[in-house]
Amino acid sequence: MKAIIIDDDFESIKTLCIMLEKFCPHVSIIATCSETVSAETVLAEVKPDLVFLDIEMPGKDGITFLKDQNSPEFEVIFVTGHDEFLLQALRLAAVDYLLKPVDPYELIYAVEQAKSRFSTKTISKRLEVLTENLINKENIKNGKICLSDADGYYIVRFKDVLYLEADNTYTLFFLMDGRQMLISKPLIEYERLLPEEEFFRIHKSYLVNMSHVTGFKKTEGGCVVLSSGRELEVSRRKKDELLERIKNLFLF
């Protein structure tokens, strides 16, 4: 894979080059840039397969720089510091990233992920999710997630998700329009990823969008009623916490 590094820190560039040579010899660094102006020209000339892009740079930051590219056909691995909100936005967009200082095992994994995604040409879709979630930082309900299944990548709004169901090591998404999407990640991954203000784990098998909860039935263990009419079992240990959430939701 042909790659370029865009970073305003010379030592970071030097370290990443050494690590790539040692741990990812199939990646060939054909250019490095310390600012985005020269990077524009380099991208047009060398047409890389992969770009290592620092987010925090003077002038135009990495995300803005990438947005300005016209339908990029390269994969991107962002390089950044520890900003929890930004990291969550990157995860929701299914965008690969490395934290400084770069760990060699994370580097190998990110490169392999980028390599597997290269032929899909979906960076524009994933960048859309990233930028919209950053814009909607204060309005979580308008957030999005990028999901991939056997057929490709899909952008889904949080508000369009009814609930998620565990299926062994997979997760089944149930959407408002009736679609079901089987994703090859366990439910716990999405419990950690989706905003807890909107989603609640009512049972070992279910993670529900609280915006679609319309009622609660006091059966033996209890069950929630969703806007679609579907009823889902609630575990006994989650019942009290759920009822407190419902009280706050409906203000009674």
Image: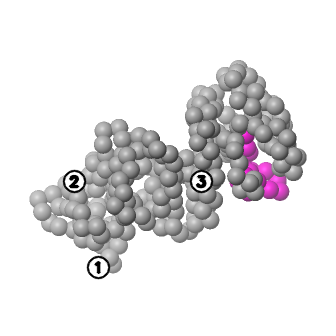
Residue interval drawn in magenta: 51-66
Element class at badge 2:
loop
Relative to the observer, which residue lies in front, 91 or 15?
91
x, y percent for residue 64: 73, 57
Please report whichever mark, 3 or 1, sits nearer to the chain's N-terminal start: 3
Q: Amino acid at mark 3?
A: Lys
Above or below: residue 140 compared with residue 146:
below
| Residue at the (20%, 56%) spot, across then down | 233
Element class at badge 3:
helix
| Residue at the (15%, 57%) spot, across then down | 221
Q: Which residue is mark 3?
A: 125
| Residue at the (59%, 51%) spot, across then down | 126
Instruction: Characterize the local packing of mark 2: few (<14), some (14-19) or many (20 or more) Cα atoms within 10 angstroms.
Output: some
**In this rendering, the label closer to the viewer, 2 or 1:** 2
Checking the image for residue 235, the label placed there is 2
Which corner quadrant holds the N terminus?
Answer: top right
Above or below: residue 103 compared with residue 218:
above
**In which quarter of the view is residue 136 placed?**
bottom right
Checking the image for residue 252, the label placed there is 1
Is 235 left or right of 75, judged from the image as shown?
left
